[in-house]
Structures are given as C-alpha cells and as structure tokens.
C-alpha cells in the first residue's frame, strides 16, 4: 500500500481556494514513465500521448525532481497491480478531504488525473463519491460519453485533433483546451480563438483550475510551461498553437 495517494498542495490546485474550492488530485506517471523508472512492464496511463510529451507537466515545478518521479511511479504500479485496493484507499482519502471542506464551508473537488488520462479510475471515484465534484482534462476522443453529473471533462486538443473533433466536443457541451505558444506568463490572452476554422470565445485557463465552473462553449487557453527547446518541438508538431490577439480579455 502507498502511504498517501492524494495531494492538495500544488500551485494550480491551490488557486481553487480563492473560489472556496478545496481540490485534491492524484499524480500518477504520465504515459510510460512508471515502467521506465521501475524497470518493469506497465501499461500506459496516457492512451493518446504524442507531441504533448514535450510539454508534459512532469517537467515543471517539483514534478521534475527524481524523488517525485519515483513516488508517482509507485502510485502508478499500485493502480495497475491492485485497482480495488487503490480505489479503496483513494476513496478513504477523498472522504477526509470532503470532511475538511465541509468544516471550512468549502466545496470538495477532485482531479484524479493530474498527469495521467485514466477514465476508468476517475469514473469509479466519481461514482463512489457523489458529494465530490471531480474534473479532468482528457485527450481521449468523445469525452462527452464519459462525463457524470459530478465528473466534468475538458477536451485537450492535440496535434491529432481534427475540425470534426473540436466541433463535436463543442456540440456536446465539452470545452476545448489549447496550449498557446506565443503568450508569456502575465501577458493577456485573446478574447476569441480559432482552431481548424472554428472560432469561439476564449478564457484564461491559467487563472484557476476550477474547470467545472467555466462557461460552456469556450476555448480554454493555457500558456506554454517549459523550456524554449521543448516549445520548438511542440510548435513544430502543431500541438502548441499561436494566437492572434485581436481583442484582449479584460
């Protein structure tokens, strides 16, 4: 058993405190990282991994420390080795988060896939804990088929996403997140954004992580976080997209 699965101490999650939301997340290894670290065969945690590997948040903040990489690899192995025990522990820890949120008159929220994209795990937690609002980003298509009343999804556009993918998600009430390549931290983002000929209002996804409170029908723009070398790769693959800031967000 892993000593602790949940974290409430991440910069992005802490931004929810301003909205009276107490968020706890689970940080597993992205893609095939766990197997590489533990030197054993484990399934991928990111079925749609691709160019996003260059900008993965495992390279950001404390996630890049070797000790953190080993810890998330062990959590990932726990999931694949004993899913029932993993879920039992995660449910217990989330119940403690919900109790703390209630004491502090806050909303309890959970982001099960901070670095991973495992819908089965997230849906199981949402089904077991209807009093907690769960949410994730996902690159797996047809996200609308996996939502719950207490599980919100934002579709993450990738180099594989087509105009039909973007349009279908908007048509089903799912917002689309895009990593932008040419807007630095602190600089304003455009009020609208166009991808594959589809133009929609845009919001600043870096202001907070409370995606389930976003307006419906918008692009969620996220500034690039990482090195210039990795940005060049992400831009060349068309995973990270440039913007044309005509009308700025106020």
Image (cartoon, rainbow, N blue to C red):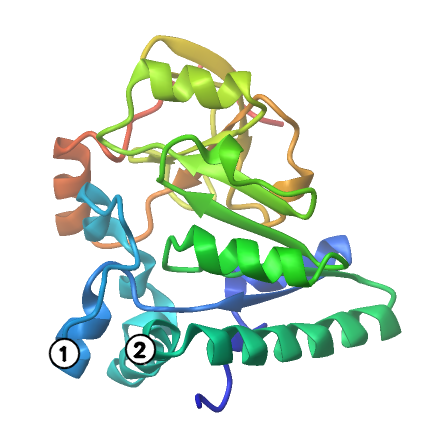
Q: Nearer the viewer, residue 193 or 109?
A: 109
Q: Residue at x 35, y 8 (%)?
A: 197
Residue 43 falls in which quadrant of the image?
A: bottom left
Is the residue 230 above or below the residue 222 in the image? below
Is residue 162 in sight in this rendering? Answer: yes
Q: Residue at x 64, y 56 (%)?
A: 127
Q: Secondary structure at mark 2?
A: helix
Q: Which residue, given by chain and number where applicable, does mark 1 sit on?
A: 40
Percent position of residue 152, x then y:
60, 43
- Between the residue at mark 2 and the residue at mark 1, the CA separation in whole angstroms equals 9 Å
The answer to whether the residues at label 2 and label 1 have Cβ atoms under 8 Å apart is yes
162 on left or right of 223? left
Q: Which mark is residue 212?
A: none
Q: Nearer the viewer, residue 63 or 207?
A: 63
Q: Nearer the viewer, residue 165 or 214?
A: 165
Q: Residue at x 22, y 31 (%)?
A: 159
**Mark toward the start of the polypeptide (2 vs 1):** 1
- Name the quarter where the N terminus is drawn: bottom left
**Within 10 Å of the Cα at label 1, are there few (<14), some (14-19), or many (20+) other Cα atoms?**
few
Percent position of residue 95, x then y:
71, 74
151 on left or right of 160? right
127 on left or right of 143? right
101 on left or right of 189? right
Q: Secondary structure at mark 1?
A: loop
Percent position of residue 13, x then y:
57, 61
Q: Which mark is residue 77?
A: 2
- Name the quarter where the C terminus is drawn: top right
Q: Residue at x 35, y 40 (%)?
A: 139
């Amino acid at each position: 058993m892993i000593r602790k699965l949940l974290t409430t101490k991440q910069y992005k999650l802490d931004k929810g405190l301003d909205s009276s939301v107490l968020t706890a997340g689970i940080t597993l290894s992205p893609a095939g990282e766990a197997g590489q670290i533990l030197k054993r065969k484990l399934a991928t945690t990111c079925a749609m991994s691709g160019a996003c590997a260059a900008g993965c948040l495992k390279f950001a903040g404390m996630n890049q420390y070797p000790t953190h990489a080993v810890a998330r690899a062990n959590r990932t192995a726990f999931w694949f080795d004993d899913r029932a025990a993993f879920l039992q522990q995660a449910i217990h820890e989330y119940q403690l988060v919900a109790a703390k949120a209630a004491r502090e008159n806050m909303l309890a929220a959970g982001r099960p896939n901070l670095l991973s994209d495992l819908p089965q795990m997230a849906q199981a937690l949402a089904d077991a804990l209807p009093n907690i609002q769960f949410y994730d980003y996902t690159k797996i298509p047809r996200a609308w088929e996996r939502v719950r009343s207490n599980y919100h999804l934002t579709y993450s556009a990738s180099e594989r996403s087509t105009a039909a993918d973007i349009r279908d998600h908007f048509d089903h009430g799912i917002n689309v997140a895009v990593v932008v390549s040419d807007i630095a931290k602190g600089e304003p983002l455009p009020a609208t954004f166009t991808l594959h000929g589809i133009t929609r209002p845009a919001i600043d996804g870096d202001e907070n992580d409370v995606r389930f409170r976003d307006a419906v029908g918008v692009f969620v723009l996220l500034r690039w976080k990482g090195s210039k070398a990795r940005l060049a790769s992400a831009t060349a693959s068309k995973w990270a997209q440039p913007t044309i800031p005509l009308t700025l967000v106020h």
